[in-house]
Amino acid sequence: MGLITSIRKRLWVVTILMALALVGFIVMDMSTGRSSWFFNNPDSMGGVAGEKLSWKEFQKTESVLYRNADVDFYGRKEYIWHQALERIVLEKESNYNGMGVSEAELKELEFGQNLSPIIERNFRDPNTGQVLREQLNQFQTGLENNDLPLEAREFWKVQEKEIIKDRMFKKMENLVKSALYMPDFMCERHFAESNAKMDFYFSRIPYTVINDEEIEITDDDINNYLKERASYYRVDEETRDLKYAVLRIVPSAEDSAAVSKILEDKKKAFQTATKDSLFIVTNLGKWDEAYSIINDIPVSILDTVLKSPVGTVIGPYVDAGDYKLSKILGKKTLPDSVKSRHILRRVTTQGEYQTAAQLLDSIKNVLEKGQGRFDSLAIQFSQDPGSGIKGGDLGYAAPGAMVKPFNDVLFYTGEKGKYYTVATQFGLHLIEITDMKFMNNISGIRLGTISETIQPGDKVMDQLLDEAQTMVEQHSSLESLQKAIEDGKTYVLDFAPGIYENDYKNAKLGEEANSTWRQIVRWAFDKNTKVGDVSSEVFSLQDPVKRFTDRFVIAALAGINPKGLPSAASVRDKVKEDILKIKKFEIIKQKAGTASQLNGTYGEYTVAVDTATEATVNGQQMPIYGFEPNVLTPISKLKPGQVGGPYRGENGVYFAQMVNMKDPGKSSNIESFRRFYKHPAYFTSMTYMMQALKKNYKVKDNRSKFF
């Protein structure tokens, strides 16, 4: 009792301790990023103009737009991100310029006669290109009655945002385009530069008179070059420079032999198979009615195929990285063209398919019994508006002109005068071949093929993975890794400069590497990754077609570039050629001096004197030497007889003497000229406008924390 009484007397102390403990848990929760109280919301991917973009909403939008769609994983995310940013920016702008989309306008865009391009895209029949009005009307009824399924409601909600954003974009675009203007003096100047013809003499001293090895390019040279072109090279985001080595996994002779034996063991069963289609499909081959021409057959087996009878199994042989077994299923002479006619019944549902099949089966029965004419029945029953009125006649077609199932009947499986029912994406067809032309007597051979990919076995994979992991463990710094690779002379360190935080593509590695490259980029931007670090993880890449691991990648962080101008190291390869030309120009200019006459000798250089006739400033082409925009403009300023130069060109240093400039006079139709020059701006104005607006509204981008 004494203890309980003591606790009661000090109850206020217990209460304070419990409160402090609770506050401690809350603070800990907030500090670990799991709470949105007082701290940034962990659901926020970023935003623009003070409006946040929710990761949950982003995922929901992606699920609705790309459900069951095989679309580039990161590409689709980038599309949704920019669409969301532009929607917010356009909504903010509408407050200033009075733009908007009213309910009546939205309804017209969704269901009226002037449908939004978004509706036309989502409700277009792929076969006819027409909008599926019936399906659209079902959505409208469901929305009005509030009885659409949840999935359909979510789709419509996302689509509606797209429609509003697209409409706002078009209104802004029209506003911007209407503001574009080109004054008369600019039109007249462009007309003169495009039509004035000039004749002149010129000489060129090529840059090759100085060897590249004689020129030293320092970091100061690069930095000065960047400063002079700051508007072009300045970046608004921090970037990373990466170096990486690719270790290719090559199958061993043992791996190849093992794959060959798999097919060798199946050869006898393939030879004796009574149902070739079942055997091929069971062994993951592709059953095809098509015949190959000689040029399409692998060279390694061509002679054997030509000499062997139908039923022969050939192989195993190697083709395109696979071991293959091929059975000769048929040989025939293929027609050069086939004339046919058909009766088409369009189908979109299982019920329509069954009805169409029954109808065409009845028509086929009538024709085979000689109780009706094909042309009359086609006019009566065919739903192909092009051929139906002509009795179903399709005329002559060359191989490949028709969709594959139709083409297979015409050229491979069909016979003249017989009837065939075939399903295509257009519907159900009843086909009759009416004529075949054989002019070139093309030999066709039908092969049934099964295959096994030659891929690295576990032994090869494990050996190379061990090698890569050992390399990473023993060389945890870029300097050490680079020396080891140079000493080993087995691998090469590739350089990827100027990588942005949300990048996911590397052209050298290919699109199939997007996911892996994204992992590498995220590692490079991790706050714990320092310049010179080598990733402790060995990354893997898959073959783009056969989907087995065929490469390992070791990555290292070579540099961190702050906002502003990039580092000299990150752009050296990109700007090296330009800087070489600049430095060579200065050397040649000093040695050549000035010229008072064009005689081919300029200081210590002797070169030819060439003639240019009827050249134009805007044409930007020098005779013989091609694109030279920085040379033709100063030449056009010379007076007849005047010598000018030296001029720095793309291909060398030029001297020129004006002979004659022909004045084109005034344009007879300045308006058409104005439209011509405004045309490019019409198509690029909104691209630059949206970039400027996003910059003005200050985009905050946290995408890299989510994917």
Image (cartoon, rainbow, N blue to C red):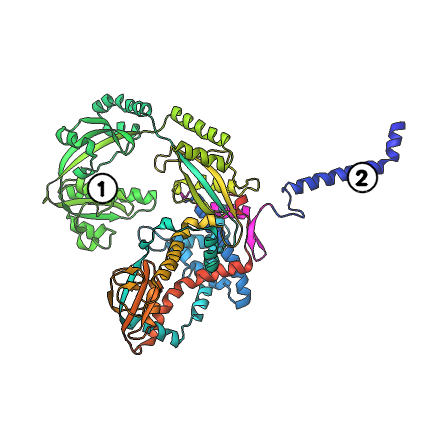
One can see residue 361 in this view: no
| Badge number at residue 432 | none
Q: Decide which of 599, 348 is in the foreground and name it.
A: 599
Sequence-earlier tag: 2 or 1: 2
Position of the N terminus, as image quadrant, is top right
Between the residue at mark 2 and the residue at mark 1, the CA separation in whole angstroms equals 86 Å
Residue type at numbered disc 1 = Thr
Mark 2, Cα crowd under 10 Å, few <14 / some 14-19 / many 20+, is few
Q: Position of residue 658 (x, y in %)?
A: 29, 72
Residue with the mark numbered 1: 421
Q: Position of residue 145 (x, y in %)?
A: 49, 53
Q: Are marks 2 and 1 in contact (CB under 8 Å)?
A: no
Residue range (magenta): 42-71
Q: Residue furthest front?
A: 604
- Confirm whether the magenta stretch covers residue 281: no
- Give SS at disc 2: helix
Q: Position of residue 443 (x, y in %)?
A: 13, 38
Residue with the mark numbered 2: 16
- Give SS at disc 1: strand
Q: Position of residue 97 (x, y in %)?
A: 52, 68
Residue 106 shown left or right of residue 624 in the figure: right
Residue type at numbered disc 2 = Ile
- Confirm whether the magenta stretch covers residue 68: yes
One can see residue 656 in this view: yes
